[in-house]
Image (cartoon, rainbow, N blue to C red):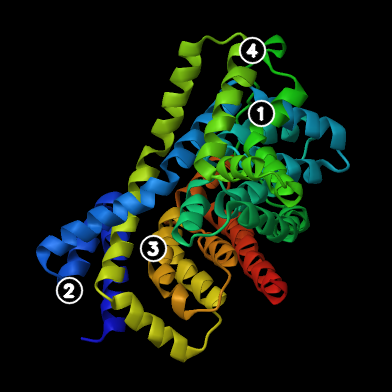
Amino acid sequence: MSLLFILLVIIGSLILLTAVFKLSPFISFILVTIFAGILLDMPLGNIVQSFQKGIGDMLGGILVTLTAGAMIGKLVAESGAATVISDRIIDVFGEKYLQWGLLLTGLIIGIPLFYNVGFVLIIPIVFTLVYRYKLPAVYVGIPMLAALSVAHSLLPPHPSPASLIDTFQASMIKTFLYGIAVAIPAIILAGPVFARTLKNIQPQGELPLVEHTATAHTLPGIFNSITSALLPVFLLLVTFALSFIAEDKLFIQVLLFIKEPSILMLLSLIVVTFTLGISQGASMKHVMNAYESGIKDIAMIILIIGASGGLKQILIDSKLSDAIGVYFQALQINPLILGWLIAAIIRLCLGSATVAGLTTAGIIAPLMGHMHADPNLMVLAIGAGSIFCSHVNDTGFWMFKEYFNVSVKDTFLSWTIMESIVSVMGLIGVLFLSVWI
């Protein structure tokens, strides 16, 4: 049995278990990992050891980053900071430039918030504007959702890009900056430009009338809201800038310490606990309850990420990755295109962007020694491929359809095309950057 065929069987088994038998991706990864080890003639004891090592290596570097990010995002949402940011941006841009304001809102809210939380949070904003300006809901919502999708797939500290950064030993600072450069043209085309073609899409019935639940006197100020929500980003950029001018060895060591993603997110979490929690009159118990709720939101994501690390380790320890690396080298295909393509195919089959990205990383990461590709750009290429062509096997597809109350056909014409534009533009942006990096 050829090694390439074995790889296809492994991927096919994962697709079969998740898409056909509807097993949890976490359970599917475990079963497929054991099956892969047996298929590759690994001793049974070694399969267990490799799996455990893979989980430890994967989660060891990103667990604090993911959990702290989820806690910050939850407090940003519950404190009303996200509402303050969105309302102020919309007021500044006004009706004439409404979509550009929504695009910026989606990007800012999308950076700290987990995708499903961000999606649900922005719906009241979209529908409030729809009622205020008498505009089509899909036309208003697509720019914000495009920005949210980009943040979810390309920008750390979101779970998928954060785990890919750890897998490929990439730089969080460089990946974030490259990601912003790739994101801007992608969300402009998929957002305000594409949305102009969607004005004729109408809901099949009434939209829910939604209102902000927080009262004005309980909301934090705009400066506090923005700095708290984007504190990890600000710290990242400040340490990056200071590293160019720092000369004192102790100061350089401190900067390197702070730049570590887990330390950076932990410092941000401590500050945000006071700026959006204690200083706003919330008790420490209330803040801690919010943090626990935030962790629950990503608990399954963490398990899936850990299990995917186990599969990656099996591919490495069985030497399958080396053989596949030689095969892909002979194809002479651009490794960034290869990463995007594998992620896009798995996304089409499975629906989950996170699983698509993690599975692809498990295949590509062991091959990086055979490839001449920037690890930061590989993270972005896989991230872009992981959101390609969202359709009926993706929960995001159905969330969009139900919230905006449109037909399946119109969901394909709006949501699916928007996600695909973001994905393809992401690849184009990555390839453009690769010429200069």
Mark with earlier residue (1, 4): 1
Residue highlighted by disc 3:
359
Q: Residues within 10 Å of mark 3 (few under 14, many from 20)?
A: many
Q: Position of residue 30 (x, y in %)?
A: 23, 55
Q: Which mark is residue 39?
A: 2
Mark with earlier residue (2, 1): 2
Q: Are marks 3 and 1 in contact (CB under 8 Å)?
A: no
Mark with earlier residue (4, 2): 2
Mark with earlier residue (3, 4): 4
Q: Where on the picture, by quarter, is residue 325?
A: bottom left
Label 2: element kind: helix
Near-viewer residue (239 or 327): 239
Label 3: element kind: helix
Q: On the rendered structure, is 374 left or right of 310?
A: right
Q: CA distance from mark 3 to mark 2?
A: 18 Å
Q: On the rendered structure, is 249 left or right of 71?
A: right
Q: Which mark is residue 279?
A: 4
Q: Which mark is residue 228?
A: 1
